[in-house]
């Protein structure tokens, strides 16, 4: 059989919606609307495969009550993003979300600006991952697509990594940015890590990332919520799903 006719098996690609910025809009008035949990359920109804929320230490958007309700009220897997602190570890152990993704956090940043520094206190980080896993929670690390960092993530015994796509989102025209993601995804998969990706992904730039066969999951929030202001939440989720699926289908050939 000619090599060109062989269809490579591609891992199904999940779409997980981050509802942080629904909470950002609510917190502008410190009221009850819009409700990020209601938004999460609407995303599920529109076909989302999972929900993500970041409980920041400063509680600037998602609140403790939100994550408690998300664990209890949604029907798809819930991914809790959080800093590696004693407070957050305790919250995770109590709530038991499907997955915890450890992320860097600086109070002065507008949004997460880069991947987690896995070289800083690696023993403490490894102990935290083991503690999370012992509570029956899947573990993930939000990291930059750098070979040494990916190798360290495997050494730390994380179940998965989420590749930071911020550099790609800022320069999608630069082949080096997508090349780093392709190489990083391939390396991580070879080390036994599940591969996720996210940050700055939009309908317009998702195709190259979605076509990377080793990536199993995309975490997308801001662009979904932004588009929803004009088209509605369900239509926004559908548009992203169509773009992802089209790119994934092209990647099979």
Image (tube, rainbow, N blue to C red):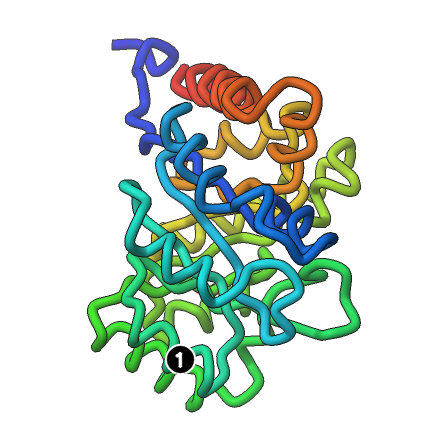
Figure check: 147 above or below 217: below
Q: Secondary structure at mark 1?
A: helix
> Measuring 49% from the left and 19% from the top, which residue is drawn there?
238
In this figure, which residue is indicated by the disc labeled 1?
89
x%, y% of residue 40?
44, 40
Q: Quadrant of the N terminus?
A: top left
Figure check: 51 above or below 84: above
- Please give left or right for residue 8 compared with residue 220 in the image: left
| Residue 22 visible to the viewer | yes
Q: Quadrant of the C terminus?
A: top left
Q: How many marks?
A: 1
| Residue 191 visible to the viewer | no
Decide which of 156, 131 is in the foreground and name it. 131
Decide which of 137, 54 is in the foreground and name it. 54
> Measuring 61% from the left and 64% from the top, which residue is drawn there?
115
> Measuring 71% from the left and 58% from the top, which residue is drawn there?
111
x%, y% of residue 138?
29, 62
- Please give left or right for residue 180 compared with residue 188 in the image: right
Give the image quarter of residue 214.
top left
> Measuring 45% from the left and 87% from the top, which residue is drawn there?
86
Decide which of 9, 53 is in the foreground and name it. 53
x%, y% of residue 76?
30, 41
x%, y% of residue 195?
41, 49
Disc 1 packing (10 Å; few <14; some 14–19; many ≥20): some
Give the image quarter of residue 104.
bottom right
Decide which of 113, 228 is in the foreground and name it. 228
- Please give left or right for residue 158 compared with residue 183 in the image: left
Identity of the residue furthest to the front in this view: 31
């Amino acid at each position: 059989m000619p090599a060109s006719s062989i269809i490579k098996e591609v891992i199904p690609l999940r779409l997980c919606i981050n509802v942080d910025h629904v909470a950002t809009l609510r917190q502008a008035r410190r009221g009850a609307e819009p409700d990020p949990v209601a938004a999460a359920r609407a995303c599920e109804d529109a076909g989302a495969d999972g929900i993500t929320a970041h409980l920041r230490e400063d509680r600037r958007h998602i609140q403790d009550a939100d994550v408690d309700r998300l664990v209890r009220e949604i029907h798809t897997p819930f991914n809790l993003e959080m800093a590696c602190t004693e407070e957050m570890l305790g919250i995770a152990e109590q709530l038991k979300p499907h997955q915890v993704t450890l992320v860097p956090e600086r109070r002065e940043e507008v949004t997460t600006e880069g991947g987690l520094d896995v070289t800083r206190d690696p023993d403490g980080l490894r102990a935290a991952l083991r503690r999370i896993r012992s509570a029956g929670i899947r573990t993930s690390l939000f990291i930059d697509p750098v070979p040494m960092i990916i190798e360290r993530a495997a050494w730390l015994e994380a179940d998965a990594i989420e590749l930071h796509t911020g550099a790609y989102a800022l320069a999608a025209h630069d082949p080096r940015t997508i090349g780093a993601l392709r190489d990083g995804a391939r390396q991580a998969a070879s080390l036994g890590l599940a591969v996720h990706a996210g940050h700055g992904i939009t309908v317009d730039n998702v195709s190259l990332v979605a076509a990377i066969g080793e990536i199993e999951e995309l975490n997308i929030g801001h662009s979904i919520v932004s588009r929803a202001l004009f088209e509605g939440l369900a239509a926004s989720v559908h548009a992203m799903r169509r773009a992802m699926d089209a790119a994934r289908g092209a990647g099979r050939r």
